[in-house]
Image (tube, rainbow, N blue to C red):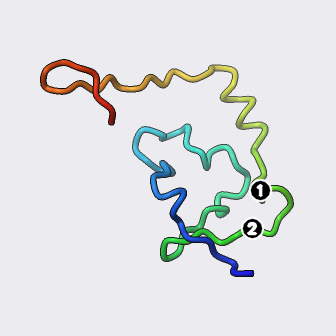
Amino acid sequence: MDACTPNAIIQEQSLGIHYNKGNDLMDYVTDKNVFNYSEGYVPVSFAPGLGIEVDEAMVREKAKTGHHWKNDVWRNADGTPAEW
């Protein structure tokens, strides 16, 4: 079995993107190295389950305040709604 899978499914991931600061996906896992990209690949994990351990303390802490993220409203020049 090949230890790498092409990055075709997660090309549009948002890890480390500017609007996720302090609330990024990697803030909620104990091992920040689970998604070490290399040449367009993420190594397949052989750990149990998905190979990701959730930082439950962080989840509980963030759950106290909830989230305040709102999607921007994108508009075309004529004012009609648009996608990203």
Side of 16 relative to 2 (left or right): left
Name the spot of residue 64 as percent of width and height, x first. Answer: 69, 21
User: Quadrant of residue 9 in the image?
Assistant: bottom right
Name the spot of residue 17 as percent of width and height, x first. Answer: 43, 47
Residue 37 is labelled as: none
Say which residue label 1 marks.
50
Residue 45 is labelled as: 2
Q: Could you tell me if the residues under marks 1 and 2 are in contact, i.e. CB atoms within 8 Å?
A: yes
- Can you say whether 54 is above or below 38 in the image? above
Residue drawn 48% across and 25% down? 69
Q: Residues within 10 Å of mark 2 (few under 14, many from 20)?
A: some
Viewer-proximal residue among 60 and 37? 37
Side of 80 relative to 83 (left or right): left
Q: Amino acid at mark 2?
A: Ser
Q: Amino acid at mark 1?
A: Leu
Residue drawn 55% across and 70% down? 6
User: Quadrant of residue 1 in the image?
Assistant: bottom right
